[in-house]
Amino acid sequence: MYNYDIMRLERYCPEILKRLIKKRKIVTISEMKEALGTTVDATIFRKLKKLSYLRSYSHRGKYYTVPQVARFNEQGLWCYRDAHFSTHRSLLKTIEHLVEQSSEGYFELELESLLHVGIRVAVLKLLREDRISRQKVSGCYLYCSSDAKTAKLQYCAREEREKISDSTLEGIGSEVSFLEGKTLVESFVSILDEKQRRLYAGLESIKLGRGGDKKIARLFGIDVHTAAKGRAELSSGELQMNGVRRTGGGRKCLEKKTPEIRALIETLMEHETAGDPMNGLKWTRKTTQNLSTELRALGIESVNRTTVARLLKGVGYSLKVNHKKKALGVKKTPEARAQRDQQFKKFKHLNRIRNQFVTKGNP
């Protein structure tokens, strides 16, 4: 008989996880499984629950820690090895708390700079659930409290601050109005390439400090994200010295994505090629539009007539326009057909001889 009064011993001890987290500061599920010797996620979460664990709001919640390890700042945020944690645990609750407690609300870029993660999806969800509100200030959305009275105070405080900031923009003398200065700056910025424009905007934004991205974007007539990107590049120190854009950008050409397209074109052109065997010129009886339609039917979706023309030119076809020529005295008799076939064989023979000479390098 079984003795049900005997208590079953705990197989996995949460203290093992606690010691692991204190040693490494932050850990992942796989590391905790290895430490406990289990392969079951539910076991890990049962033990973590006893430790009042915290989960990162960055990296899709990949990292875990405990409150005894984290060193939160006055805003309730803590970062360790690029993993970000909050006393409010989730990103949604963190944004909601920051917005509610702010005296002036937050712009999207200010929240992203503070939290170091993208917040667009999160704020849209908060707006749908009426947990925060937003109002436009100087062309950008200001996220405010869900309480109408608090939101109005935040909006007024931000409006007042923006007026003061606009009146003290650096680089514009007292004898020149803002609009005149803005025109002069836009004229100068227009002669820079996009990389120079972005880095210059980032440099001026760093000089202005908090809210500099929006001010410089308004002054330069550029998008606020351009100024923010330039500032981030300068701050990181990872500048590309050669070229305007990073190498490898842009869409790959069709030949690289679909290497078999050349073979398909040659197959389609096998019986549709005409030419002059003496000078090596050859052309197709089909239009580039018809060829692109046939290629799409064979499964090459992203092809158009321009791409076909470029590929044909690459394999030696002339893109001359076909003109109909009236054949005089041609009869559709067996003898006439035999004569044309004989002529066709002669042209093929001449073309073969010409190719042999070209291959050997003879004139």
Image (tube, grey):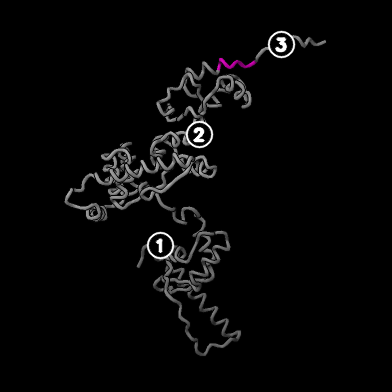
- The answer to which of marks 3 and 2 sits earlier in the sequence is 3
Image depth: mark 3 or mark 2 in front: 2
Residue 348 visible in rendering:
no
What residue did someone put label 3 on?
Answer: 7
Looking at the picture, tell me which residue is in the foreground, 256 or 9. 9
The reply, left or right, for residue 199 in relation to residue 357 is: left
> Residue flagged by tag 2: what amino acid is it?
Lys
Label number found at residue 93: 2
- Up-down relation of residue 70 to residue 228 (above or below): above
Work out which residue is located at the far bottom of the displayed protein and give it. Answer: 329
Residue 300 location in percent, x, y?
54, 59
Quadrant containing the N terminus is top right
Image quadrant for the C terminus?
bottom left
Quadrant of the image occupied by residue 13: top right
Distance, label 3 to label 2, CA atoms, is 41 Å
Residue 29 point in image, percent of width and height? 55, 26
Instruction: Determine whether, in the image, residue 23 is placed left or right of residue 242.
Output: right
Q: Which residues are magenta?
A: 11-16
Tell me the residue at 52%/67% (across/down). Answer: 291
Q: Earlier in the sequence, mark 3 or mark 1?
A: 3
Q: CA distance from mark 3 to mark 1?
A: 91 Å
284 or 213: nearer the viewer = 213
Of marks 3 and 1, the one in the foreground: 3
Dot 2 lies on which element?
helix
Amino acid under label 1?
Thr
Query: Going by the picture, which residue comes out furthest to the left?
Result: 175
Residue 359 shows which numbered tag? 1
Does the magenta run of residues contain 33?
A: no
Q: CA distance from mark 1 to mark 2?
A: 74 Å
Residue 52 position within the rendered picture, expressed as x and y whole percent measured from the top left = 55, 22
Q: Which residue in the rendered view is the most extreme toward the right?
A: 1
